[in-house]
């Protein structure tokens, strides 16, 4: 099929907008868990470790399912994958309104919702970079800004719903809101520009271009999963991702509880959590765009160092303005590194098996994302303080910055294979 020349309006930006809206809903629901955390702990009489454990199981299942979701998207496209996501998330949130036993919390949230959200995130961040060669970081930055928007909106919304109704009915309302918006938007998604008779944005301008001097230019070959996991570059990215997810998920689950522990009002604490997401919008768009010019490596370092420093400062936060300041700086850094990961996979390993390779890399979520919340819950239950957990989170970010300084683009050493493995 002969590709049509790109018209004045490029459909790839519809993919970006649709993906952004989907992530608003997906991650607005996920990161509202920190709001429901105190309600579950108090109303059901469970320990912080027990309630944190359900989220940690969520992160394990979430990370493992990324691999399946990535390969599924490569083969079947985003619309079918998103249908699976919508059904699972809505069912999971409806079931959460009925929770009375620990096994139910772990099954409904830790398994069903976890799998559903994996089939939402992976198709979006694996499809968007296929539509762009130039401005790939910018497009991904705008797309994943939806995660921050979701946190900004859903954290205070969830708290407001809990105040007005209760936590059980609030889960049902979120389920209804999710399906009403997500289903029609998901129909706009397409895997590849060829489905619209188009070429990726900017492909005609990229021949021979090298960006930022750090090997961020698009790969001219497509690594298979097997080839990718044999490279040092893949494992440095994997380690960096594990380390970064420890403090990120720790904050997203426990920030409200930490603030309330120091006498901060619940709604103020919920707004602080929402602010992490709100400012992350700026970080995602700004660092995604900046990374197209200064390179992914420097952008990673800026993000991780800013997060590490403010994590140390969090131990002294006692006033609302101090929590807001933490949320702003941490949110910017957190938002900044998120679009860099799928962009780097596309830059270094090519697009043919992007979903499969990024899915493999995202197994890091199962490790770091599970460890952070569980560690914080255990530390608080044991010592009545979050300080040790905060120190561990800051140290992990400093090491992640060191990993990012060491990364280099890989070199392919074998001919391209016919399958992802």
Image (cartoon, helix red, strand yellow):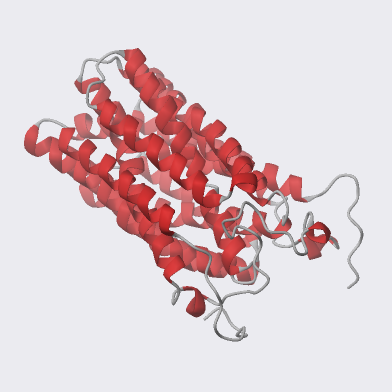
* Residue drawn at x 34%, y 20% as measured from the top left: 323
Rendered location of residue 53, percent (x, y): 23, 48
Nearer to us in this view, 386 or 298: 298
Image quadrant where one finds the N terminus: bottom right
The location of residue 111, given as percent across then percent down, is 36, 56
x%, y% of residue 389? 20, 39
Query: Vertically, is 411 above or below 212?
Result: below
- Please name the residue shown 81% across and 57% down the image: 205
Q: Can residue 65 be seen in this view?
A: yes
Task: Report if residue 83 is visible in the image.
Answer: no
Please name the residue shown 60% across and 45% down the image.
294
Q: Picture coordinates of residue 284 (x, y %)? A: 55, 39
Query: Taking 347 as reference, is 145 above or below it?
Result: above
Res 311 quadrant in image: top left
Horizontal side, residue 338 vs residue 129: left or right: left
- Asked if 169 appears above or below 349 in the picture, the reply is above
Would residue 418 appear left or right of 407 to someone viewing this image?
A: right
């Amino acid at each position: 099929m002969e590709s049509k020349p790109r018209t004045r309006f490029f459909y790839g930006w519809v993919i970006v907008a649709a993906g952004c809206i989907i992530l608003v809903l997906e991650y607005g629901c996920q990161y509202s868990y920190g709001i429901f955390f105190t309600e579950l702990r108090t109303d059901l009489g469970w320990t912080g470790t027990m309630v944190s454990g359900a989220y940690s199981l969520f992160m394990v299942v979430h990370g493992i399912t990324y691999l399946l979701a990535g390969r599924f998207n490569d083969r079947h496209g985003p619309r079918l994958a998103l249908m699976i996501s919508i059904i699972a998330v809505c069912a999971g949130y409806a079931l959460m309104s009925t929770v009375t036993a620990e096994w139910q919390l772990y099954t409904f949230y830790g398994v069903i919702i976890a799998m559903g959200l994996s089939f939402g995130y992976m198709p979006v961040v694996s499809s968007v970079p296929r539509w762009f060669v130039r401005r790939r970081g910018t497009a991904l930055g705008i797309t994943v800004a939806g995660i921050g928007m979701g946190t900004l909106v859903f954290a205070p919304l969830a708290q407001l719903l809990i105040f007005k109704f209760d936590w059980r009915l609030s889960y049902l309302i979120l389920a209804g809101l999710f399906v009403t918006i997500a289903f029609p938007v998901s129909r706009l998604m397409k895997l590849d520009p060829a489905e619209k008779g188009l070429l990726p944005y900017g492909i005609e301008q990229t021949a021979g271009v090298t960006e930022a001097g750090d090997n961020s230019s698009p790969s001219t070959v497509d690594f298979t999963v097997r080839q990718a996991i044999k490279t040092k570059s893949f494992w440095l990215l994997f380690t960096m991702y594990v380390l970064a997810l420890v403090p990120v998920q720790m904050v997203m689950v426990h920030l409200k509880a930490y603030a309330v522990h120091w006498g901060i009002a619940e709604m103020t604490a919920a707004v602080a959590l929402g602010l992490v997401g709100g400012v992350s919008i700026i970080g995602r768009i700004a660092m995604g765009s900046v990374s197209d010019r200064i390179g992914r490596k420097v952008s990673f370092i800026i993000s991780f160092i800013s997060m590490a420093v403010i994590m140390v400062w969090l131990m002294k936060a006692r006033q609302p303005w101090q929590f807001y300041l933490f949320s702003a700086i941490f949110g910017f850094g957190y938002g900044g590194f998120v679009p860099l990961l799928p962009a780097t996979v596309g830059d270094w390993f090519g697009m043919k098996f992007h979903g499969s390779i990024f899915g493999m890399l995202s197994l890091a979520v199962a490790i770091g994302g599970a460890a952070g919340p569980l560690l914080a819950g255990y530390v608080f239950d044991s010592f009545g303080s979050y300080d040790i957990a905060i120190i561990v989170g800051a140290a992990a970010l400093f090491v992640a910055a060191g990993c990012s300084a060491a990364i280099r683009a890989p070199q392919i050493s074998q001919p391209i294979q016919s399958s992802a493995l």
